[in-house]
Amino acid sequence: PTFGVFSCPAQCRGMTTPELTQEEAIACVAVFNAHANGGDTITVWDMKTCMDTVGLSLSEVELFHLASQVDSNTTCRATLDQFLRIVSARKRSLIKLSKASAEDDMLETFVACGGRRNRTGNVNKAALTKILRDEFGMFFDIEAKFDELDLNQTGRLDYSGFQKLLS
């Protein structure tokens, strides 16, 4: 997500989480402060607007689920710390979804090249080279990398070798 460029409010100096960079934390603090109206909390509805602003939109169901995980008092308000935990949780879930989608794409490509959906079977060098060039527009030296991974020089790669070829 794009967070834009914000000046660093004093309360965010040095603030990062495993999911949030310093720039993202700064953006989150700035957006939070803009909706807190001088206070130290925002409402759940403000939180939805803040999440939209930083590019991490949530459905109402997702929002209330995440808010319930950090707001043990069920006040429907969030402090800056709670808001940052919600942003971090959302970003973490999006990263997981992205990784799952990339794995799905890899498997679909393996199957399209002759492998099986259960990650068994092999892909043929000639077929793979043709598909990668013609269908996917990949023009790196496929043959050389294939040969490097095809230790037995069979002209075939299993799923593990296929993943290495494309990573």
Image (spheres, rainbow, N blue to C red):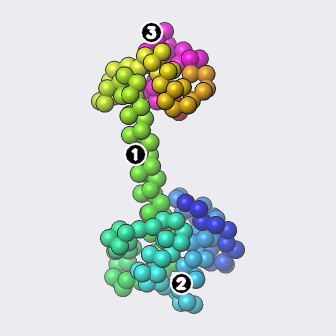
Marked residue nearer the N-terminal end (2 or 1): 2
Disc assigned to residue 100: 1
Q: Residues within 10 Å of mark 2 (few under 14, many from 20)?
A: some
Per the rendered image, the range of residues in magenta is 143-165
Task: State the residue position of label 3.
Answer: 154
Q: Is residue 118 left or right of residue 63?
A: left
- Kindly state the secondary structure of the residue where label 3 is placed: loop
Residue shown at the point (44%, 63%) measured from the top left: 90
Q: Is residue 62 left or right of residue 36?
A: left
Query: How many numbered discs?
Result: 3
Vertical comparison of 126 with 41: above or below: above
- Label 1 sits on what residue type? Ala
Vertical comparison of 76 with 90: above or below: below
Residue shown at the point (42%, 38%) measured from the top left: 105
- Kindly state the secondary structure of the residue where label 1 is placed: helix
Vertical comparison of 103 with 130: above or below: below
